[in-house]
Amino acid sequence: MNSPRASLQTKILNVQLFIQQHLDEPLALERLAEIADYSPCHFHRLFRGQVGESADDYVRRLRLERAALSLRYRRQTVLEIALDAGYGSHEAFTRAFARLFGVTPSEYQSLKHPPDAIKEQLMNAVEYTATNVRIETQPARRMAFLRVVGPYNHATLGPGFGRIYHWAMQNNAFGSQTQGIGVYHDDPEVTDGSKQRADVGITVSNDFQVASGDEVQLQTVPGGTCAVLRHQGHYDTLGTAYRWLYSVWLPESGREPAKAPPYELYVHDCNTLPPEEWLTDICIPLVE
């Protein structure tokens, strides 16, 4: 039997997944409460207790953080990005953005990310060139996962992967085509470390099911065109590879990132090799 706490966590996670999949739609408190099967007042208290911020604040922050990424990487005007974020005017968007980031959207868009000096250091820190990036059509992947919230490092994510692998062994979820997979919803240069969302898991067949109320949930990582970079080394060195991809390769490629989050495919079991031999495919979804 599932504990009441596990059931509550599952319901709130389902709401969070719904939010990230429908961020462009109206997300009234009543609609979210209905998904969780609570009254609006009760849901408001439970969501804040589980997530650390109200549902309204959570939705607002995700929209503004996505807007920051659009300002940096996508070829849209400030007004277009404001409308995408659910604001009816440039002025309202500017006020909300400035409260969160301390600068106006136009100022943020004009900043160099990263500055030239850091970009030069970054280029010297990696051995990658454009030839290391593969443009591939990735299939959609069904994954069983746990949500981990915290800084993107091995200390935070490793226990989550340990739990999902233990669960997979207990539930006969491993198959001949199983891969480790992690979906990373936030940019560490935009989102505070304490709020960074990662879904850590394994791929499963399309007909795989989990028990009702299980803390492990299912989602589908969409297929499509991706930039794929194979990284070798400890997982804590992946951050430099990401910064190179987004700050060096992406502007020079002329490609534009899609709104879907990046994800990682783990080529082998890290327990079988030393960290310097760990291989990870970083997949950045691209606009077609």
Image (cartoon, helix red, strand yellow):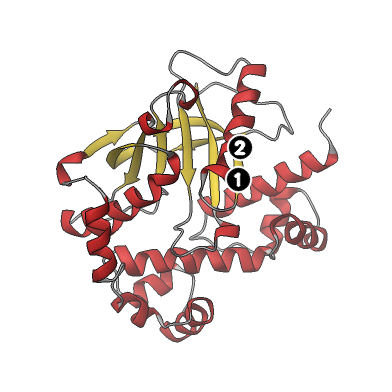
Q: Determine the residue positioned at 60% across, 30% down.
A: 162
Looking at the image, which is closer to me, 89 or 105? 105
| Local SS, label 1 | strand
Residue 121 is situated, as x and y percent measured from the top left of the image, at 26, 61
Residue 150 is situated, as x and y percent measured from the top left of the image, at 59, 52
Looking at the image, which is closer to me, 168 or 124? 124
Residue indicated by mark 1: 148
Number of numbered callouts drawn: 2
| Local SS, label 2 | helix
Q: Mark 1: which amino acid?
A: Val
Residue indicated by mark 2: 160
* On screen, residue 6 above or below 62: above
Quarter of the figure that contains the N terminus: top right
Residue 167 is situated, as x and y percent measured from the top left of the image, at 65, 24
* On screen, residue 90 above or below 275: below
Looking at the image, which is closer to me, 28 or 260? 260
Q: Determine the residue positioned at 72% across, 52% down.
A: 34
Q: Mark 2: which amino acid?
A: Gly
Q: Determine the residue positioned at 25% across, 69% down.
A: 117
